[in-house]
Amino acid sequence: MKKGRMKYIVLIIVLIIYGVFMYLFFGIDETRERKATTTLLIGNSAVWNYSFRSWMNITNNQTLSSLNWQKFTTYVNNQFFGNYSVWLDDKWYLFDDNRQAVNYQGDLFAYQADFDMDVLPFTVSDIDDFSYVNQVLEEHELSSNASYTLAKMTSFDFDKDGVLEDFYFVSNVFATDFFPDKYFSFVFMVKSGKIYMLYEDVDQNDGTNGCRPQLYTVADFDNDRDYELILVCSKYSVQTPVAMLYEFSDGEFKIVISNQ
Ligand SMILES: [Ca+2]
Ligand SMILES: [Ca+2]
């Protein structure tokens, strides 16, 4: 009998140790992500809330105005700008602790979170090698002899493996000095010679349709240690731009939330 009881005690101790071990190795990340709560302001395009592992568009005026005078961590043109209180009118206005207005020029990204968000800086430059762009154009039966209204790229280590990935942004929308039959807009990543598409849009051109894509923010928005990224696609005139949050999973980019 005594031997039998001893066996149970040993078994229970082993199970407890196993449980603690599993929690330490797998549970903490899970808990981090489950606990993460954040609200993002994507310029004038969108306000997104993340909690209980799901994303939500905030469009209700009462909920939006409840953000007024709340403190956010702000970035302008992808550079850290400061911690300021926000106020929504025709755009988000920023105020310091003495309620003095703080002016900013450019694209505002702001977040409020119960964790320190890892926001990745990047700089965009002209494309010097069009071989991947031409490959994409040819795959869409577009002439590689195209004229562009947008031809930019940037490089950063998106998947944290120590090697930079290249991101390309090309478009011929809203052309004024040439008039293509078809407009196109593409955003794609190149990793180890392979193209991963984020955004592709090709259609008949009427000069004002389509949208001009732009990488807005790269960050670990949900605190799971992987980066996600936000693309904003500007339409002609003053319409609200399309805003899309992408995650990379199972070898492809997926839109997690969009404002439309
Ligand atoms: Ca990488
Ligand atoms: Ca993440």
Image (cartoon, rainbow, N blue to C red):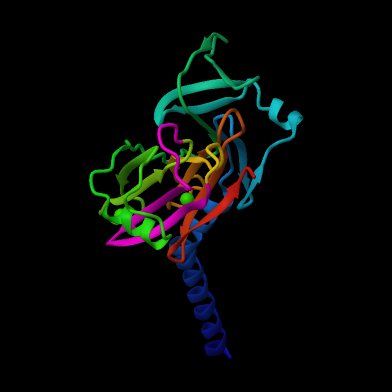
* Residue at 45% from the left image edge and 19% from the top image edge: 105
- Give percent across and percent down for residue 131: 26, 55
Q: Locate residue 141: give its quadrant.
A: bottom left
Q: Is residue 136 left or right of residue 69?
A: left
Examine the rendering and report whether any part of residue 159 can be seen. no
Examine the rendering and report whether any part of residue 255 can be seen. yes
Q: Nearer the viewer, residue 235 or 143?
A: 143
* Residue at 63% from the left image edge and 47% from the top image edge: 51
- Give percent across and percent down for residue 139: 39, 62
Q: Which residue is farthest bottom?
A: 1
Magenta residue check for 209:
no
Q: Is residue 134 left or right of residue 217?
A: left
Q: Is residue 252 above or below residue 100?
A: below
Q: Is residue 173 above or below residue 144?
A: above
Which secondary structure dominates the residues rendered in magenta?
strand
* Residue at 33% from the left image edge and 37% from the top image edge: 124
Magenta region: 175-204
Q: Is residue 187 above or below residue 2?
A: above
